[in-house]
Image (spheres, helix red, strand yellow):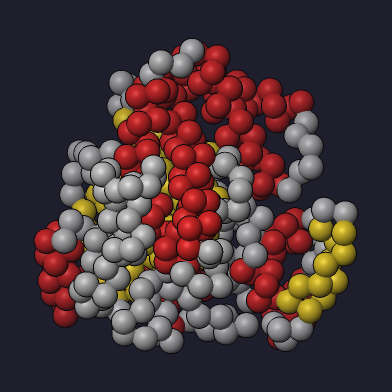
């Protein structure tokens, strides 16, 4: 572990030199004076500018407030060539407080969408925050309610939200605004940033004739005037976030937006069908989706998102969860969550993950490195390998 710590220290120094994550993210320079209206320089991506290491061991990023410690780690899947980029990127920005991950999708240039989103999300969030401060109370409450309801819809795959869910979401949004207006404005700004990002990714798709898209799981920790701490997470796709509470229980706080999650939730796939598909992941089965029959393999079910940045939809889900001292938050791409699956299931083995995060004999960096190594070398039933990107937050 001492050797890993030395490597992590060296990598952290390198990362600070290149402004934390510039050495691993898909570098897409953003130039305000660029000819196109979006300020994205597609002809000067500089992907080969620096040698990109295969692995960035866990390192701490300071500046997120008292008693809040943030750590991050990245690794490319084993089959990637040395010069190839990681489709996964991390966003860890002390200036805006934004924390999260992106996972590029598409048959080619998946790293393009994730890199652009990581680069421009902070500035879009700041711009939206300025606009949110001018919105009325009802406009803010409406925006937050929509995000909360979107989470319920995605978590349960409901085609129609019932009146009880609407009432609960509205009440939660009203309570947030009445107790902490600043928090409400920040949530609203985070949700409003998604349409702006969607517009830019759409422009890139047209300019480069590419199907590049990205998942996202982005949020922040807010401290209210009464010193309570709140974790706000937005999500599109199959990246996700969870909390290991101080009592050892692990709770997923985001819902997966994959086609597989949809089929499981709508009970078109049971445990027997799932195991058969995982045994023969390229074999196609017939399913019903949006009123029509489609044939999909297990590989396609895992790769196809019911929502992501670049799919033409602008809304994201949101959750608001109180954090207590001793809690640990982990935000990761599917390269993390897919490798902690329970045997004969597609569910995440939260108990196993909780045990790794709760090991008191290790430092936080060592814990995250253990999670990364477990994810990179654990074989799933379908033997799918993937890039890895994760952010861990501890609350003292």
Q: Residue at x 73, y 76 (%)?
A: 297
- How many numbered badges does the structure rendering display? 0
Front-most of 263 and 359? 263
Q: Residue at x 30, y 21 (%)?
A: 225
Q: Quadrant of the N terminus?
A: bottom left
Describe residue 305's horizontal placement relative to residue 130 as left or right: right
Furthest-front residue in this view: 35
The reply to whether residue 275 is in sight is: no
The reply to whether residue 138 is in sight is: yes
Q: Quadrant of the C terminus?
A: top left
Image location (x, y in percent) of residue 346:
65, 69
Q: Image height check: is 386 above or below 19?
A: below
Image location (x, y in percent) of residue 261:
68, 60
Image location (x, y in percent) of residue 362:
26, 67
Q: Residue 265's image quarter? A: bottom right
Image location (x, y in percent) of residue 71:
27, 57
Q: Residue at x 61, y 48 (%)?
A: 312
Q: Residue 10's image quarter? A: bottom left
Q: Residue at x 40, y 83 (%)?
A: 80
Describe residue 224's horizontal placement relative to residue 313 as left or right: left
Q: Image height check: is 372 above or below 308?
A: below
Front-most of 319 and 292? 292
Q: Image height check: is 6 above or below 204?
A: below
Front-most of 50 and 231? 50
Q: Residue 332's image quarter? A: bottom left
Front-most of 236 and 272? 236
């Amino acid at each position: 572990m001492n050797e890993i710590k030395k490597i992590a220290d060296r990598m952290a120094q390198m990362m600070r030199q290149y402004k934390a994550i510039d050495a691993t993210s898909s570098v897409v320079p953003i130039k305000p004076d660029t000819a196109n209206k979006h300020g994205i320089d597609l002809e000067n991506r500089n992907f080969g500018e620096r040698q990109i290491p295969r692995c960035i061991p866990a390192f701490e990023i300071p500046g997120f407030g008292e008693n809040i410690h943030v750590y991050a780690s990245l690794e490319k899947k084993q089959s990637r060539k040395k010069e190839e980029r990681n489709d996964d990127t991390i966003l860890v920005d002390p200036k805006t407080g934004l924390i999260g991950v992106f996972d590029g999708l598409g048959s080619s240039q998946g790293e393009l969408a994730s890199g652009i989103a990581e680069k421009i999300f902070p500035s879009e969030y700041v711009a939206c925050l300025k606009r949110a401060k001018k919105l009325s109370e009802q406009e803010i409450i409406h925006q937050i309610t929509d995000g909360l309801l979107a989470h319920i819809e995605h978590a349960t795959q409901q085609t129609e939200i019932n009146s009880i869910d609407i009432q609960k979401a509205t009440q939660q949004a009203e309570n947030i605004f009445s107790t902490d207006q600043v928090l409400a404005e920040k949530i609203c700004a985070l949700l409003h940033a998604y349409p702006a990002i969607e517009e830019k990714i759409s422009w890139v798709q047209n300019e480069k004739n590419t199907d590049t898209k990205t998942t996202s799981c982005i949020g922040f920790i807010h401290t209210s005037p009464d010193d309570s701490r709140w974790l706000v997470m937005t999500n599109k796709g199959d990246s996700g976030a969870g909390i290991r509470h101080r009592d050892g229980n692990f709770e997923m706080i985001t819902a997966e937006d994959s086609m597989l999650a949809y089929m499981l939730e709508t009970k078109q796939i049971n445990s027997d069908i799932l195991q058969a598909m995982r045994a023969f992941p390229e074999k196609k089965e017939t399913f019903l989706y949006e009123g029509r029959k489609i044939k999909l393999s297990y590989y396609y079910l895992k790769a196809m998102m019911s929502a992501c940045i670049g799919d033409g939809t602008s809304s994201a889900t949101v959750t608001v969860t109180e954090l207590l001292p001793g809690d640990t938050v982990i935000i990761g791409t599917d390269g993390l969550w897919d490798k902690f699956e329970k045997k004969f299931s597609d569910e995440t083995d939260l108990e196993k993950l909780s045990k790794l995060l709760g090991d008191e004999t290790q430092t936080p960096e060592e814990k995250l490195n253990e999670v990364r190594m477990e994810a990179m070398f654990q074989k799933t039933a379908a033997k799918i390998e993937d890039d890895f990107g994760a952010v861990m937050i501890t609350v003292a």
